[in-house]
Image (tube, rainbow, N blue to C red):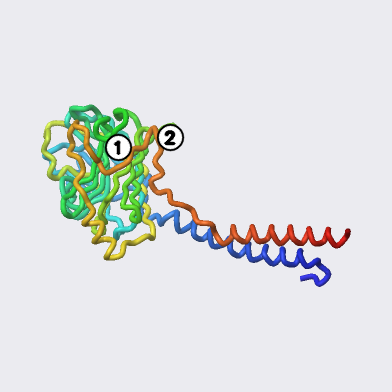
Amino acid sequence: MNPGMPRYLQLGALVFFLLAGCLLVPAARASVDAGTLVYSTDFTTDPHWSTNNPATNYWNSSLGMFHYLMRDGSGAYVNVKVPYHGESFTLAFDILPERTEYQSSVKFGLGDDDQVTQERLTMFTEFVNGPYGRLIWIRSINNLNERREASSYYLSYGGPTVQFSDGTWYHVVMDYRLETRSLTLSVTRRNDSSPVWQYSLTSLDTFPTMNRIYMSKIGDSTNPSAVAEGYIDNVSFRVFEESATPTEAGQAGQAGQGSPPASPRAPANNGGTTGFPAEIPSTARPVPVSPAMGLVAAALTILAMGIGARRAGKR
């Protein structure tokens, strides 16, 4: 530093350089918090998804989307394997339900080798046309077959009933947070990003053996003649670095509780929190004061003291 520089300016400059170095740490941390993209497809090329019924579930090369047709009793499935080991994750996709007949549904989410949506380890969202309308569901089932679930029906989640429409594109985000054991479903309209429905399930288990993004009708038998048909587009899957310790995993398994059944009666405790129209910051956490913020305060204090001392010396 310049020896002729006033002492208070020397101290202020030193703190400034320390501050600049510390600011690099939050920048690096922000890149970690963004997660790691481990799978994505916009269907401009063949995604090579596996299916046991390629005649009805296939990549449409001319449209650049994936066509689905799901029918109970068919045992149809579609999947793509992804690297997942129980971390926090975000699964996002666009869906266009074109024909959702009464008592039909389409399910999309994460599952294991069995691809059974009635039991075993799975998290998925479901667009279903049933007795109470065209509802959106969020479901989670652990390895003890304990279910956590809620629908957009007013008695299920405690807000106004929300229904989807055939012929409308929706953007769907499933966000699982290991540290809070929560799964948040956010649904918006793709064309204008307007909110449709949001809900958070809580007190969930860990799901380390889920290994694929999938749609499935294995085990479904409500109405074998009803068809759910449409398109999937813009699928992305991100994982985050948080991991559970063995103790945490065991505690989560003990804490898992059955969710309310898929019925119109109001649950006493559905194990979740509702979103739209009220927003739910499901992943929000208190932000601690960073070292950089402390250095800013120190620099300002030193400069103020130096300026005050210099003025006093001139009197």
Secondary structure found at label 2: loop
Q: Earlier in the sequence, mark 2 or mark 1?
A: 2
Disc number placed over residue 144 in the picture, else none: none
Work out whether 129 lies above or below 240.
above
In this orientation, does residue 63 appear? no
Q: For mark 2, does the 10 Å Cα neighbourhood hold few (<14), some (14 to 19), or many (20 or more) residues?
A: few
Q: Amino acid at mark 1?
A: Tyr
Q: Quadrant of residue 100?
A: top left
Which residue is disc 2 drawn over? 193
Residue at the extreme right of the image, as rendered: 315
Q: Position of residue 306 (x, y in %)?
A: 77, 62
The residue lying toward the viewer, choosing from 201 and 80, is 201
Write the residue at 19% across / 32% down.
Answer: 265
SS at mark 1 in the image: strand
Mark 2 vs mark 1, foreground winner is 2
Residue 285 visible to an observer of this rendering = yes
- Residue 130 locus on image (x, y percent): 19, 30
Tell me if 5 is positioned left or right of 68 in this view.
Answer: right
**Residue beneath the point at 28% across and 35% down:** 157
Give the residue at x 24% y 47%. Answer: 140
| Mark 2–mark 1 distance (CA, rounded to whole Å) | 18 Å
Residue type indicated by callout 2: Ser
The residue beneath circle 1 is 231
Can you say which quadrant of the picture contains the N terminus? bottom right
Disc 2, disc 1: CB below 8 Å? no
Q: Position of residue 223 (x, y in %)?
A: 12, 33
